[in-house]
Image (cartoon, helix red, strand yellow):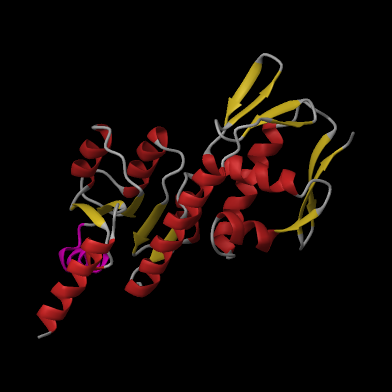
Amino acid sequence: MVYLLRLKTKLQHLIMAETKAHLLYVEDDESLSFVTRDNLELNGYDVTYCEDGKVAMNIIESGRKFDLCILDVMLPEVDGFTLAQEIRKRDEQVPIIFLTAKSMKQDKIHGLTIGADDYMTKPFSIEELLLKVDIFLRRTKYTNILKSNTPISIGNYTFDYKNLDLSLGDGSETLTQKEADLLKLLNEHRNEVTKRSYILESIWGKDDYFLGRSLDVFISRLRKYLKDDERIKIENIHGVGFKFRVDE
């Protein structure tokens, strides 16, 4: 009876989904991967599963595109951090979630700063993972819809959000998706104090210590990119957030 109900639920998802999100899931724990993949598929996702990093790397290098990637960190052959870096070379926007037994702060910070969107420590809740997958997929879809076709001026710079381009004179910098999202959000609140919690919730989906450290890294990058116009400052408001100041 339980089997029939699960089968019915899976068929309903298949019928209702016009276009299923395609996920890459890399995990070498056989039992965990079976449960996780089963739950993802029951919730209507198309899952490409790999049991080691080398197989996943071959798929990534083949050019296949995914809507979201779930990566274990400790993998045979090629680790999850290396996979994430390779994915980011090809796609700056696809959400990446790390699943790992590691709980060291430096590991979490490293994972987030190389481009991951979130980091879940084992054992984790399947319900929480499904919620995060849903949130990140909806946010990515929303970002694609809202991308502006019109470049804007920030001081002497020209910011083309759609094409992830920040230019000044003959020089230009190609931003990552998160760098562009952060610059766009700060500029929308130009000359106002923007709270850290608001930034983290808007771009990363939650406010916690590790994501806060990642935010600091991204702020440093934007300051570097914008350093050639002295009228532009990203001020740190201690204990509150940041003020993106553009003096006219």
Residue 125 in view in this figure: no
- The question of residue 34 being in magenta is answered with yes
| Residue at image location 27% in from the left, 59% down from the top | 45
Residue 113 in picture, x, y percent from top left? 51, 47
135 or 19: which is nearer to us? 19
| Residue at image location 60% in from the left, 33% down from the top | 149
Q: Eyeballing the image, is 76 above or below 208?
A: above
| Residue at image location 40% in from the left, 62% down from the top | 134
41 or 37: which is nearer to us? 41
Which residue is outermost to the top? 170
47 or 99: which is nearer to us? 47
| Residue at image location 71% in from the left, 47% down from the top | 186
Number of marks present in the image shown: 0
Residue 154 in picture, x, y percent from top left? 76, 33
- The question of residue 245 being in magenta is answered with no
Q: Quadrant of residue 196?
A: bottom right
**Residue numbers of the magenta segment:** 28-40
Residue 135 in view in this figure: yes
86 or 12: which is nearer to us? 12
Left or right of 201? Residue 75 is: left
Left or right of 82? Residue 147 is: right
Left or right of 50? Residue 241 is: right
Residue 47 in picture, x, y percent from top left? 23, 55
Q: Quadrant of residue 5?
A: bottom left
